[in-house]
Amino acid sequence: MPPDRDLKLAFSDVNHFYAIGSNRALVFDADAISGGHPPIIVAKFDPNTEVSSITSDGRKAILVVTESPEHVRLVLFDTTTGQREAIPPGWYDSADSETPAALSGDGRLLSVFSASGIADSPLAVSVYDWPTRTLVVKRTSEWLSAGGAYTGGVTSDGQIEFVSTRGKRKLVDLKTGSLLAWFGLDSVRSPDGKWVVDFPDRNWNESAPRDALLKDGTSAQTRGKLNFDPPVSDDESYGTMSGAFCGTTGRFVAARAQSVALYSIPGGNLLVSFPVSSWRDPKADEMEVPTVACSPTGTRVAILSGSRLTFHDLN
């Protein structure tokens, strides 16, 4: 599987799996793949296309199409039909080549981020109800850090977050705008917002924990940690991990450069470790962290290492 920029992976069910990147959208039937059948190409994209966001089931995606240095288009793409719908240009600044847009997990809410530069509340997230094409709410925030880049949008469970590349995620309530919690940049949120796995990232804080902490998705209170074996190394404590929840099944897949393993939520106990030889692309850099996805049933895991995509069945 040739790698794409901004490649995003998602299971719609235990058999059907979407891989959506800057060049094309693919749908895999995992059972058919094991029988030697290739994936189906749903669509090929124009050059200079980026994937901004996908739904939890991979069936919808936001594409950012750069037509010139001064003009971009936002498009909602349906991976099941190949249909493309223009996102109303009045919702975003078409002259901003880095317009961040996001979808809620169910695809009902669509958000657009902007930074006005106004001193008191320069960061803004506008959330729209896609079926009715109406504005739901606009929330603003002060700067999150001294320097860095900013973005933000609707979360999988329908809250709003503001993000700084200097290690911070600020979660606010969509309805009231009140602050809910702070999380790390390299954190992964469950589809229902109940849990967050906060991976270690000491780039901006050397005293930050080295563990992958399991936190309450609303309050950010620490409820436990993933029991890694081997423990987190120095190199791994600087934002080099990724992961994916298995729907709301109480399972989580954590990916490290030398390890991919499944853990229980909320216990954090190791359930199974996938042998490196079963997923690693021999041509991939040894320090490259694979991309992972898990089915909503928690019974199938996809691992992308370099250009090698593998599926793993679980009990």
Image (cartoon, rainbow, N blue to C red):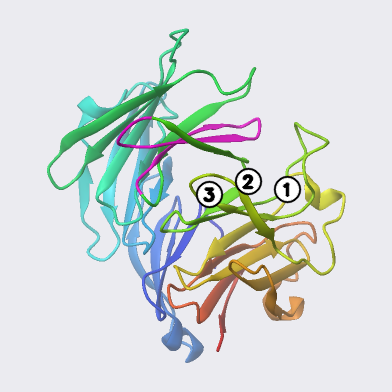
Q: Answer with the quarter of the image where residue 153 lies.
A: top left
- Taking 298 as reference, is 46 left or right? left
Query: Within the image, what quadrant is residue 92 found in?
Result: top left
**Distance of label 2 from label 3 (alpha carbons):** 19 Å
Q: Which residue is mark 2?
A: 186
Image position of 175 (left or right of 287): left
Frontmost residue, 18 versus 223: 223
Q: Nearer the viewer, residue 151 or 211?
A: 211
Q: Does residue 175 belong to the magenta stretch?
A: yes
Is there a contact, CB below 8 Å, between mark 2 and mark 1?
yes
In the picture as drawn, the residue positioned furthest to the top comes out as 119
Tell me residue 20's x, y (percent).
42, 58
Residue 7 drawn at (x, y percent):
50, 55
Which residue is painted at 41% across and 46% down in the image? 155
Which mark is first along the chain, 1 or 2? 2
Q: In the rendering, which numbered label is found on residue 153?
A: none
Q: Mark yes or no: residue 277 visible.
A: yes
Q: Amino acid at mark 3?
A: Arg
Name the residue: 68% across, 51% down. 199
Q: Is residue 75 above or below residue 43?
A: above
Mark 1 to mark 3 CA distance (whole Å): 25 Å
Q: What residue is disc 3 on?
A: 5
Question: Which residue lies under the disc numbered 1?
Answer: 200
Q: Earlier in the sequence, mark 1 or mark 3?
A: 3
Which stretch appears magenta?
158-177
Where residue 138 sits, quadrant-wise, is top left
